[in-house]
Amino acid sequence: MNFLEEKIAKEGTVKEGNVLKVDNFLNHQMDIPLFNEMGKEWKRRFAGKPINKILTIEASGIGIACIAAQQFDVPVVFAKKAKSINIEGEVYVAEVESFTHKCKNQVIVAEKFLTPQDHVLIIDDFLANGYALQGLIQIVQSAGATVEGIGIAIEKGFQPGGRVIRNLGYQLESLAIVEAMDWKTGAITFREQG
Amino acid sequence: MNFLEEKIAKEGTVKEGNVLKVDNFLNHQMDIPLFNEMGKEWKRRFAGKPINKILTIEASGIGIACIAAQQFDVPVVFAKKAKSINIEGEVYVAEVESFTHKCKNQVIVAEKFLTPQDHVLIIDDFLANGYALQGLIQIVQSAGATVEGIGIAIEKGFQPGGRVIRNLGYQLESLAIVEAMDWKTGAITFREQG
């Protein structure tokens, strides 16, 4: 097991309905040294890619993306989930369904923050059905920018998001891929990664 | 002018309705080296305080809080704006009005992440009317924890939030306090800080 799988095995808990609770360290309380390890691992896996910007989505992607950005020396842009009066001018929009909240959100990025010159690393905390990620990819493509790679903390390997994204040819690096989990026993099985 | 005031003067823009747009570097695209400078300045201003946790609120506080947390070697907890199915058990709740979105939100923090033993630094990007901040203070108090200080990036000094918080006796450290701004000329006036 790598450092993140060990953390999940130790501190994550499985709840009914395929819910993996990692709010101790990932998406409510945030373990900053752990995020730094994640950033270093993505830097290793995306070595040589001409990444000049990280794109994530509010809210729980932001902390991970900001800490990881220190490894790449690049700014972070986060996609916003609702129209704000402070965003004006032209924006890229994608519609995203939320697994957690059972609703649809529009996510937006101001056009000025993504251009055809940008080489983007997308970062998020979870990948399950992949709707949020597909929305972010769509936004990068709308800008004419390039998706250099996708870094995910935890992928639910038994849901289709990861397969779809890999089939599309993207370099998707999930630091932990959960193959199965059992809320009755609490057991979590990870996919072997080379 | 300090480093943040200089950044605001150079890259911020003033819009009608007392809107200060700093989305180039603070709350849509995020300038990580700038956040590091902010963290160092708060570390200096809160030197000697027994801070063991940073509390912020989604979304735009998260990145600043995570980078600042590296100066304090503490975890970050972010208050969430809506009930999520992934939050269960007991939560602290406060009701918060949003200046930006003209609506009320419930903000919540899981009880397990704030205890009477916690000495909390609250971090956020903006302080205007102070509703969000009052909600966070209320949550810390509900937990029986101690507010050791409050770090704000940009305070709108012509709105009442900062005065209320200082009158209550909290150490509030706003790195830039905007005394006045004029959307017709673009002029921004900062309060002199000792």
Image: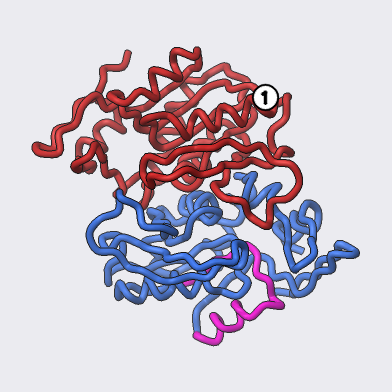
Chain colours: A blue, B red
Whether residue A84 appears in magenta in the rendering, the answer is: no
Subunit under mark 1: B
Question: In this view, which residue lies farthest toward the bottom?
Answer: A167
Residue B86 percent across, percent down from the top left: 68, 56
Quick check: A116 left or right of A104?
left
Give the tally of numbered discs. Answer: 1
Quarter placement of the C terminus of chain B: top left
Residue at x 73%, y 63% (from the top left corner): A19
Q: Amino acid at mark 1?
A: Ala
Quarter placement of the N terminus of chain B: top left
Q: Nearer the viewer, residue A133 or A44?
A: A133
Task: Please tell me whether residue B119 is drawn above or below residue A62 in the rendered image.
Answer: above
Residue B151 percent across, percent down from the top left: 46, 28
The image quarter in which residue A159 lies: bottom right
The image quarter in which residue B181 lies: top left
Q: Which residue is mark 1?
A: B145
Task: Please tell me whether residue B144 is drawn above or below residue A184 in the rendered image.
Answer: above
Quick check: A91 left or right of B101?
left
Quick check: A109 left or right of A66?
left
Whether residue A160 appears in magenta in the rendering, the answer is: yes
Task: Please tell me whether residue B138 is drawn above or below residue A77 in the rendered image.
Answer: above
Residue A148 visible to the viewer: no
Q: Residues within 10 Å of mark 1 (few under 14, many from 20)?
A: some
Question: In this view, which residue lies farthest toward the right?
Answer: A185
Residue B84 visible to the viewer: yes
Residue at x 64%, y 40% (from the top left corner): B109
The image quarter in which residue A54 lies: bottom left
Identify the magenta region.
Answer: A148-168
Residue A134 percent across, percent down from the top left: 48, 75
Residue at x 64%, y 44% (from the top left corner): A29
Tag 1's secondary structure?
Answer: loop
Residue at x 47%, y 48% (from the top left corner): B59
